[in-house]
Amino acid sequence: MIKIKTPQEIQIMYEGGKILAEILRKLSETVRPGITTNDLEELARELVLSYGVKPSFLGYDGFPAALCTSVNDEIVHGVPSDRILKDGDLLKLDMGVLHEGFHTDSAITVIVGKVIYTTPPGGVCPQKLISVTKEALRIGISKTKVGNTLGDIGSAIQEYVEGNGFSVVRDLVGHGIGRELHEPPQVMNYGKAGEGEELKSGMVIAIEPMVVTGSWKIKNSKDGFGFVTKDGSMAAHFEHTVAITEKGPFVITG
């Protein structure tokens, strides 16, 4: 059952979302060649403490970290490790925080150091991949209006991504969010306009296009938590928590 939030609850989520956005900004500014993804995890935990929020991911289904760090062909849910970041790595930073009983969830993709143009199969300029994925999120958010459907979101994202020569991952989706990190409904990045659940005022969803340069097929990563592209192609990921209101979409983590 989809849970409708009150204006007061959405305001609480917005307060948490502002904190999450600031944490992700500080993490992205720290990214550089030579540091490890564990270094970013340590900073994420320090920032969570300093802002007085709790990490949503830590311990969720056994996940051992506060931050997801997914590199290159890793799409999402990569566990921070002693892996040293190098020039040209495509790094996805995905994080959630719990503030006054409500979760928010957001993700960004950044290039580490200098852009390297030698990429895996299906590779293209990583800056274009990032640009298309970020724009796909904006387009998806623009469809989060009362009376539209989840299919309107997914079809708009899919059309834009595939029109730019990329693929959207099918087996990983966005989700409702609130008192639980993952709530109904599932928010797919593909589909048909007009189909699926109708959007109502007070719904809050996490929209998160996951875009790859090759095939959309995926497999589990070696750490048992993450997902990687099956063909080794590069992946990008952007995500915002968005409330549907009578006035239009309200980006909580913007």
Image (cartoon, rainbow, N blue to C red):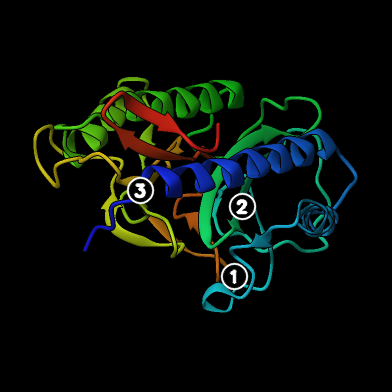
Query: For the residues carrying marks 1 and 2, which lies nearer the camera in this image?
Result: 2
Residue 95 numbered tag? 2
Q: Position of residue 65 (x, y in %)?
A: 69, 67
- In the displayed structure, does residue 108 sit left or right of residue 115? left
- In the displayed structure, does residue 207 sit left or right of residue 54? left
For image coordinates 34% across by 61% down, the residue present is 183
Helix, strand or loop at disc 2? strand
In the picture as drawn, the residue positioned furthest to the bottom comes out as 62
Helix, strand or loop at disc 1? loop
For image coordinates 45% across by 39% down, the residue present is 212
Q: Position of residue 130 (x, y in %)?
A: 55, 27
- Residue at numbered disc 3: 6
In the picture as drawn, the residue positioned furthest to the left comes out as 194
Q: Residues within 10 Å of mark 2 (few under 14, many from 20)?
A: many
For image coordinates 79% across by 60% down, the residue present is 45
**Looking at the image, can residue 209 be seen?**
no
Q: How far is disc 3 from disc 1 in space, using C-alphas?
A: 41 Å
